[in-house]
Image: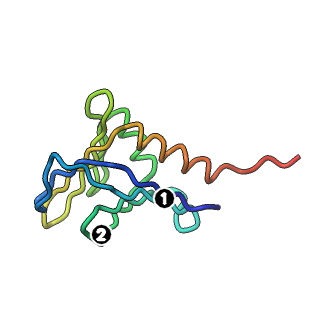
Amino acid sequence: MSVVEQYARAHIVSDVDISEDEAVPVVLRYDPDIDPRSVRVGLPGTHDEWIFSRSLLEQGLRAPVGSGEVRVWPCGRVQAVVEFHTPQGVSVVQFETKALLRFLRRTYMATATPVTR
């Protein structure tokens, strides 16, 4: 199975000194060989990678959901928010929904079983 990696432009609201008006590249990653049920999100300027359920991301595009340190919810008609909680603070990342949908679609294509004839 193949790894899916996609950069998505996002706005980050955080304790870190990043301008809220500035869109930054966030890395979305899916590696079915490591864990076919999880996705990874890498925030710029850190070596941190958040790992959480792919279904949480998918469900959060339709209605607010949360699990542990990660919460996802739709924000208007074209955006979605992913919120990460740590003891040091909270990072709120706002994405265009279509970028997350494209990423999710690619993850399902990566795990689709080829049809043999």
Q: Which residue is mark 1?
A: 5
Image disc number at residue 106? none
> Which corner quadrant holds the N terminus?
bottom right
Q: Which residue occupies the extreme right position in the image?
A: 117
Residue at point 79%, 46% (across, down): 115
Q: Residues within 10 Å of mark 1 (few under 14, many from 20)?
A: some
Residue at point 45%, 46% (across, down): 55
- Give the vertical position of 79 relative to 91 (above or below): above
Residue at point 55%, 48% (across, down): 106
Residue 99 relative to residue 66: left or right: right
Q: Amino acid at mark 1?
A: Glu
Foreground residue among 40 and 21: 21
Image coordinates for residue 68, horizontal then vertical, percent: 28, 56
Image coordinates for residue 116, horizontal then vertical, percent: 84, 49
Q: Which residue is mark 2?
A: 48
Q: Which residue occupies the extreme top position in the image?
A: 77
Q: Secondary structure at mark 2?
A: loop
Residue 117 relative to residue 4: left or right: right
Image coordinates for residue 89, horizontal then vertical, percent: 13, 61
2 vs 1, front mark: 1
Q: Amino acid at mark 2?
A: Asp
Residue 102 relative to residue 20: left or right: right
Total number of numbered labels? 2
